[in-house]
Image (cartoon, rainbow, N blue to C red):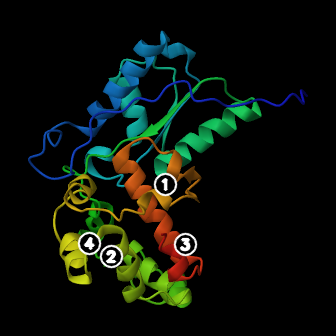
Amino acid sequence: MSTVARTAVIVDAVRTPSGRGKPGGALSGIHPVDLAAHVLRVTLERNGLESSQIDDVLLGCVSQVGEQTMNIARQAVLAAGFDERVPATTIDRQCGSSQQAISFGAQAIMSGTADLIVAGGMQNMSQIPISSAMTVAEQFGFTSPTNESKSWLHRYGDQEISQFRGAELIAEKWNISREELDDILGWFTGLDAAALQQAANSELTLRDFFGTVTLTTDAELITGKVCGVRVEEVDDDLMRSIRQMDLLVDELARGKKIANIKRG
C-alpha cells in the first residue's frame, strides 16, 4: 500500500447568478436540476474535461422534496449530458451541505479512492421553500420532524429545534445579552437598537443594508480571523464588512470585553 501523501486542490469554481429565493424572481422559474446541470456543463467546458474523467459528483441540497428529491445530484448529472456511468450522490448536512460535499470530495482524493471530483450544491428556494421538507409529512399525520419520535422526546422534549432557538441557547449559555449585541453593532453601523431591529425586520439584503449605513471610522482597525478568514485580507468591500461584523459578534461570544471590541 502506498504511503505517499496526496493533496487535494480546487481546480475551478463555477456558480449561477444568485437570487433572493422568492416567487417571481429572475431564477424562480428554473428547475433546480437545470440550475445544477448548467453549472456542471460549464465546469467541463471551462477546463477541457470529458465527463467520463469524473470519478464522482457530490452535491449538497437541504430540502430534498418535490423537484429536489430522488437524488437530485444524479438527475443533474444526467441532465447535463454526462456519461451515464458517472455516479452522483446528494448530501444533506443542512446549511453545511455543500461545504460537506467539498470536504467529502477532498477526502476521497486525499485517500486515493478518487482523482477528480465535482462537488457543490443546489437549491431553488422559490420553488421549494426552506421549510418544505419539514411540513410535507403533515398530510400523513406528523406534526414535526421529531415530535412523533419517543426516543427524541425522551431526550429533548418537544422544545423548538431551529437556528433561532439555537442562537438563543448559545446567548444564554455564554451570558450574551441583546443589549450587548445592540451596543456592538450600533458602534459598528451607527444605528441605534430600534433602527437595527427595523433593518432586521425588513427585506433588505446585506448589500442593501451596508449600502445605507455609515460604518465607524475605526472599521479598518477590526482585524483578526473568523471562519478561517482574516477579515483585513478580504478584498471585496461588502464581504469585508460582513466578516467584520461576524468577528465582532464572535469576540463578544468568546468573552472579550466590549471596551476592547470597540476599536479606536
Indicate the quadrant where residue 28 lies.
top left
The residue singled out by tag 3 in the image is 251
In the picture, the disc for residue 186 is 2
In what element is the residue under mark 3?
A: helix
What is the C-alpha distance between the residues marked 2 and 4?
42 Å
Q: In the rendered image, which quarter contains the N terminus?
A: top right
Relative depth, front residue between 64 and 22: 22
Residue type indicated by callout 3: Glu
In what element is the residue under mark 1?
A: loop
Q: Is residue 203 above or below residue 90?
A: below
Residue 109 relative to residue 61: left or right:
right
In the picture, the disc for residue 167 is none
Residue at the spot 37% in from the left edge and 76% down from the top edge: 164
Determine whether label 1 and label 4 are within 8 Å by CB: no
| Labels 1, 3: front one | 3
Indicate the quadrant where residue 194 lies.
bottom left
Question: Which of marks 4 and 3 precedes in the sequence?
Answer: 4
Indicate the quadrant where residue 60 lies.
top left
The residue singled out by tag 4 in the image is 138
Q: Position of residue 206 (x, y in %)?
A: 27, 57
Residue type indicated by callout 1: Gly
In the picture, the disc for residue 96 is 1
Q: Is residue 65 above or below residue 248?
A: above
Q: Position of residue 48 (x, y in %)?
A: 48, 9
What is the C-alpha distance between the residues marked 2 and 3?
15 Å
Q: Residues within 10 Å of mark 1 (few under 14, many from 20)?
A: some
| Labels 3, 4: front one | 3
Q: Residues within 10 Å of mark 4 (few under 14, many from 20)?
A: few
What is the C-alpha distance between the residues marked 3 and 4?
41 Å
Residue at the spot 16% in from the left edge and 63% down from the top edge: 203
Relative depth, front residue between 77 and 110: 110
